[in-house]
Amino acid sequence: MKLNIVIVLFLTTALITSSAFAHQWCWTSNQCNTYGWQLMTPDERKTHQAKLVSFRDYSTCAKYIEMHYKSMDDRAKINGVTLPPIEDNPCEALKALGKLK
């Protein structure tokens, strides 16, 4: 019985620790930090996030983001939507996390 409690405590601690560590090094796009979020489908959002975290150098990320911003501006015009000003640059966030060189 004591062994089961020890195993459960160990596994719980390992799970919590690994989740906290993984989250510390993770960047996630969301409606607060993704320009044009409301104009993207759920699949486009997933693809956008996957694309961003796949980059290893800043210049490639910056080129992609420039194209993304233009695409979202074009969609906004077509849909008669005014997008809020760009506040965050995901490439800067990824660079700060050490993901981009």
Image (cartoon, grey):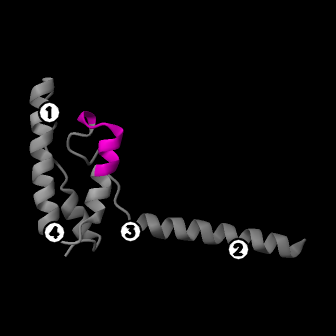
Asked if the stretch drawn in magenta spans residue 42, the answer is yes
Q: In the image, 29: left or right of 1?
A: left
The residue wearing badge 4 is 58
> Mark 4: which secondary structure?
helix
Q: Quadrant of residue 4?
A: bottom right
Q: In the image, 66: left or right of 54?
A: left
| As drawn, 27 above or below 13 | above
| Amino acid marked by disc 2 | Phe
Question: How far apart are the alpha carbons under marks 2 and 3?
Answer: 23 Å
Q: Position of residue 93 (x, y in %)?
A: 24, 62
Question: How far apart are the alpha carbons under marks 4 and 3?
Answer: 17 Å
| As drawn, 26 above or below 43 | below
| Amino acid marked by disc 3 | Trp
Main SS of the magenta part reads helix
The residue wearing badge 3 is 25
Magenta segment? 38-47
The residue wearing badge 1 is 75
> Mark 3: which secondary structure?
loop
Q: Nearer the viewer, residue 98 or 68?
A: 68
The residue wearing badge 2 is 10
Q: Residue at x 10, y 53 (%)?
A: 66
Q: Nearer the viewer, residue 29 or 5?
A: 29
> Disc 2 or 4, which lies upstream in sequence?
2
Disc 1 crowd, CA 10 A, few/some/many (<14, 14-19, 20+): some
Q: Residue at x 15, y 34 (%)?
A: 83
Question: How far apart are the alpha carbons under marks 2 and 4?
Answer: 39 Å
Q: In the image, 67: left or right of 2?
A: left
Question: How far apart are the alpha carbons under marks 1 and 4?
Answer: 25 Å
Would you say the residues marked 2 and 3 are in contact, meaning their CB atoms lie under 8 Å apart? Answer: no
